[in-house]
Image (spheres, rainbow, N blue to C red):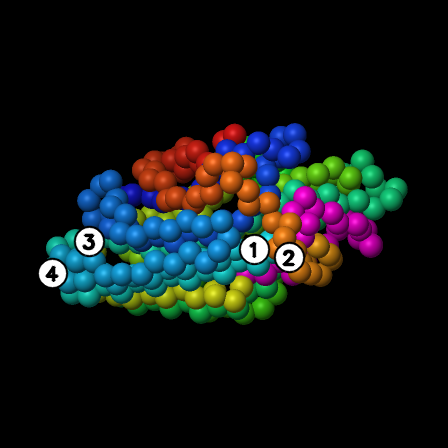
Amino acid sequence: MKLGFVFVAVACSSPLSADLMNPFTSSSAYAADCTNLPCTTLASQVLPGDAATVSGTSAAGSGAYSFGASASASFGVLKVASSSALSTPISPVSFVSSGDALFVDIVTIDSGPQTGEPGLLALAYTLDGVIAQSGSISSAAVITAIVGAPPFGSLIGGPNFQQAMYTTPISGKFEFPQLFSFTYGTPFNLYLEMNAGTGTEDFVSSGGVISGIGRSTTVAGSGNVDFSNTATLSGLHTFDAQGNPVLNPVFTSVSGTRYTANGVVAEPSSLILIVPGVLCLLALRRKRVYPVASGRKSLKLEGFSR
């Protein structure tokens, strides 16, 4: 039976705005031995935005598994990396390594006569990264964007929950394929997450969520994902409900971050809302799920429940 993984975020903060999640940033680096279940954590570090880093070597049958992962998050800029190398296993083994960075903000977009009217938002991002893989190791980078209010899991399958996956080197500016919906003058959560994953797993999209399906192997291999300089939120383009451009919108955010049509200007670090006691958990964890025929039912997004 194969083992699946899906990345989820869990927070238990007191909202600054009714029904919205407080602004925060989180960085997570993680590696695990999943040869036997439950998986054994080899290394893990979770930090509120600062650079999280893990590395090491573990026995893998008669061989060795070397891993590294890092992540760093600020409002509008996410940096992640992951590496795996598996040598000469004789008995079946399974390992994973991941770097994950995210931010959540409370954003309001307004534009005079549009106040109170439904609007559409195009999100653009810039990527510049290396992805390599050989043998038994798979490598992928996944970027996720959510616009709305918790529970975020309720948005899966609709245009306000979108993901993109990359398995080859990539560089350039990209847009999520669909427009996100919002209401002018009404605050909403803006959630952006970037993950770099390597290991003995296959990355698939099921039930509207990209996840890694673990597997065991006796074949050596290596993989590397390095987005140490990006992703960067590089465009927020607004439209009315009919898809007509709305020019010169006014962006405000609870974090104090300056969002514009051209992305993020600069993060005012003194205003970042990472306060002890406000967030009781800033964590990304791989949640084990067993795939079933229905797909969506196997993806238990506990972290997207309020």
Whichever of labels 2 and 4 marks the residue nearer the N terminus, that label is 4
Q: Secondary structure at mark 1?
A: strand
Tag 3: Cα neighbours inside 10 Å, few (<14), some, or many (≥20)? many
> Looking at the rendered structure, which numbered label has been put on residue 267?
2
Q: Is residue 256 magenta?
A: yes
Q: Are marks 1 and 2 in contact (CB under 8 Å)?
A: yes
Label 4 sits on residue: 62
| Res 221 visible | yes
Label 1 sits on residue: 74
Label 3 sits on residue: 93
Residue drawn at (52%, 67%) of the image: 229
Q: Secondary structure at mark 3?
A: loop
Q: Based on the displayed image, in which of its 4 quarters is residue 190 positioned?
A: top right
The residue mark sitting in front, 3 or 2, is: 2
Residue drawn at (74%, 47%) of the image: 252
User: What kind of residue is marked 4?
Assistant: Ser
Whichever of labels 4 and 3 marks the residue nearer the N terminus, that label is 4
| Relative side of 106 to 242, left or right | left
The residue mark sitting in front, 1 or 4, is: 1
Whichever of labels 1 and 2 marks the residue nearer the N terminus, that label is 1
Please tell me which residue lies in front, 297 or 108.
Answer: 108
Q: Picture coordinates of residue 73 (x, y %)?
A: 52, 55
Classify 286 as above or below 15: below
The Cα atoms of the two marked residues, 3 and 1, are separated by 36 Å
Residue drawn at (17%, 57%) of the image: 60
Tag 4: Cα neighbours inside 10 Å, few (<14), some, or many (≥20)? few
